[in-house]
Image (cartoon, rainbow, N blue to C red):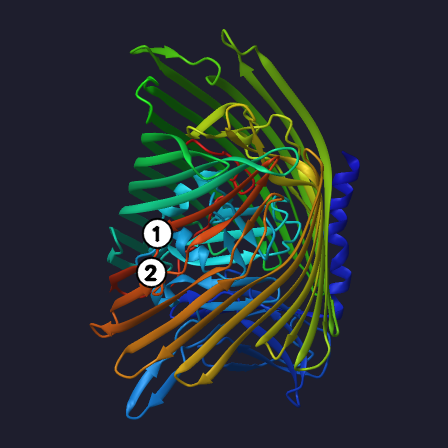
Amino acid sequence: MRIPLLLLFVIFTFPAALAQQERSIHVRVHSVNQPLPFVTIQLLGADSTVIGSTTCDSLGQAVIRVSNPSAAWIRTSMPGYTQVTSPLAGPGAAASMTIDIDLQPELHTIGEVTVRGKKPLLQFLPDRTVVNVDAGISNAGTTVMEVLEKSPGVIVDREGSISLRGRTGVVVMIDGKLTQLAGTDLQNLLNGMSASQVETIELINNPSSKYDAAGNAGLINIRLKKNKQGGFNAVLGLSYGQGKLPKTNNNLTLNYRKAALSYFLNYNWSSNRNFTRLYADRSYFAGNGTKESSLEQDSDLRSRGLSHTLRGGVDYSFSKRTGIGLAGSYFYLQRRNRGDNSADWKNNTGGTDSTIITDSRSSSQIKQASGNFNFRHQFSSSLEWTADLDLVKYQLFSDQYFENRSSDPQVPLDASSGRIPSDLSIYSAKTDFVRRLAWGSVETGLKSSRVETDNLAGYELLDQGEWKPDNGKSNHFIYTENIHAAYLDVSAKTGRFELQGGLRYENTRYNGSQLGNTVTTDSSFSRKYSNLFPTAMARYQADSANSFTLRAGRRIDRPAFQKLNPFVIILNKYTYQQGNPYFNPQFTWNMELTHTYRGILNTTLSYNITSDYFSQIFYSDEITGIIIYSEGNIGNMNNLGLSVSTQLNIAPWWSLSLQADLNHKRLRGQLWKDYRAEITQGNFNVNNQFRLARGWSAELSGFYTTRSQNDLQEVLDPNGSVSVGVAKQLLRDKATLRLALRDIFYTQRMQGLTHFRSVEEFFKLTRDTRVATLSFTWRLGRNGKPAFRKTGGASDVMERVGNIN
């Protein structure tokens, strides 16, 4: 105990001696009384040469270290806003000071009409890409999943798994909390969330040690809207979309602040009808490679989703330095599905031997309730303490029914049903200290979380007109997990160099128990392990136009809870999904070098090494022809990547954002044989924003993904889409009317080839992606000072629940 206490004493007392050599300037940037994140801050000499630069955090704050006596100015800039240059006090000024800077949206004149600039859709920063959702006209009326599908470097496969810059193992967070869902559950959650609830989506490739170590490919942090203005404010959003089926997303946000007390309330309701058409041609081969038979399946799934989201909270500031907050949310999603499937068994000459017609009905529910208490205290302008307590409860439920009829009248009706309820509880507590110093900053913190899950799968079979338990598939699985973490992160700046180093320690313990029945015996497993996760960053400002940033770090991916559960989920008569209790974590070393030119062009070269690589695994039953989907550790993956992004103002009325990602992946694994795969793949994203006269604006955007591979056995063909939109400001800029058309050429279709042992399957997936949406947003209320508000801290335990349907 003496060593940690001594370490904390050194952290918070020894650096004071160095503080006299440099000045520490705390910069706070805001616009229209709201914090403005990710603004570029440059330190200039008397001759306007750039001495150093940094970027504001998500709260619009940054710390500049001034050691050069020639430093005379601070320049603040961001695309879409007027640049501000502020003078610095002389060398004899106080060692620590705070500067508040207000950036105003740019005003451009087109003819006789003055047009106000707006926040860009994409912001390419050295450590992340930020998607400003409202800035994209074609995002109107969409879901969060639909916004992610067209975000730079993001690929979503047919199972809903998300990859970032060609790599799987992405952690999805909402307001800094991991969703703790995976697979179909995560897909349902993101499809049930309206994009109108979202302020920004942050794509973070190589996080520092203050973040949870989960996510080998990085983090996707979805930041929900929070009205930070004082007084009374309200935002009403309505949208209707029509593809082949209708969709609607609607929301209302209320915010009120008086003196030190503030309240907020948000309600969102959505109803979406969709369809999914899946064609699959599965070929079975003999040992000598000749084709023996095939199974041709054509599926049509129609679904209707209904969701309600309610969020609210209260914040109270005891003083300028101390505040507390309470927040809660409730989310309800219900999805009903009806499917028709035909399966034709064919011989090696292509003739049909038999046909199975399947009628399926299923429904799924997600109920989530969460609560958060947070506390913040600033001991001084340089020392801050924060604490968070979180409780999250999920209730997941899936109900399935399959009825299979053969073309042979002698074959009896085959039917099965299943009820799959799951309960999940998440408890989390964390505390963080931040010490800002003249030469840099020190951050340290502790975090502890506990997860409890109780999963039941009850299946029945129709036997001669009587329903009987199917104990071979039924299952009861109980799982608990505890993770305890501590981290230390130190950053420093001297001259043209900025350095950061961190170390995170995580201890994980989990236990899983499968309760037996007349067919399945009791079984259990447990494991505990501890790991260190170092991170490092070095940035060099070569001159006023060029900077270089080197980052490295180690990360972990833990299996989703449900993927450790050995029970079977029936997808259709010939396709099952099954968990793997022997699933181990995978570990990744990430390294990247970024060159930034004048803040408008970023070029990144990256290399990643993953051991015990996760991959979807496909097994085939040679007797029944059933394919079983599972996941496991298959070997290693190496990834070499190149990313180029730029943001240009072509004209005062036209801004252009481009990002290109190229990856060369090499997979080495062991399945039924030594398996090797190599592929070079690319993802390209372009967005044009046009600011027109008389309150009009327009957008033309699109993305394209080349032939790609995420799993060892599955390769996806190229796909992409093009979207357009127009918007008009109304009611003295208090309201916005948008019309958007997504996937106008209907090219966002997914198809590919999957290799099994002695089996090969071609598939093609089509969804209701070509949609025209009309939306209306109305902003009401008065502006005032921003209120203190904070999100919770259960950010490492909301990503890994798994599938329920």
Image quarter in which the C terminus is found: top left
Which mark, by number, is residue 262?
1
Residue at (28%, 47%) from the top-left corner? 272
Above or below, comparing residue 669 to residue 141 in the picture? above
Secondary structure of residue under mark 1: strand
Of residue 277 and residue 550, the one placed in the foreground of this image is: 277
CA distance separating discs 2 and 1: 8 Å
Residue placed furthest toward the top: 518
Secondary structure of residue under mark 2: loop
Above or below, comparing residue 206 to residue 291 in the picture? below
The answer to whether residue 83 is seen in the rendering is yes
Q: Amino acid at mark 1?
A: Ser
Residue at (28%, 72%) from the top-left corner? 727
The answer to whether residue 798 is seen in the rendering is no
Residue placed furthest toward the left: 731
Of residue 461 and residue 204, the one placed in the foreground of this image is: 461
Query: Which of the marked residues, 2 or 1, is nearer the chain's N terminus?
Result: 2
Image quarter in which the N terminus is found: top right
Residue 188: image location, x then y, percent: 39, 41
- Mark 2 and mark 1 in contact? Answer it, CB < 8 Å: yes
Residue 409: image location, x then y, percent: 30, 21
Above or below, comparing residue 139 to residue 315 in the picture? below
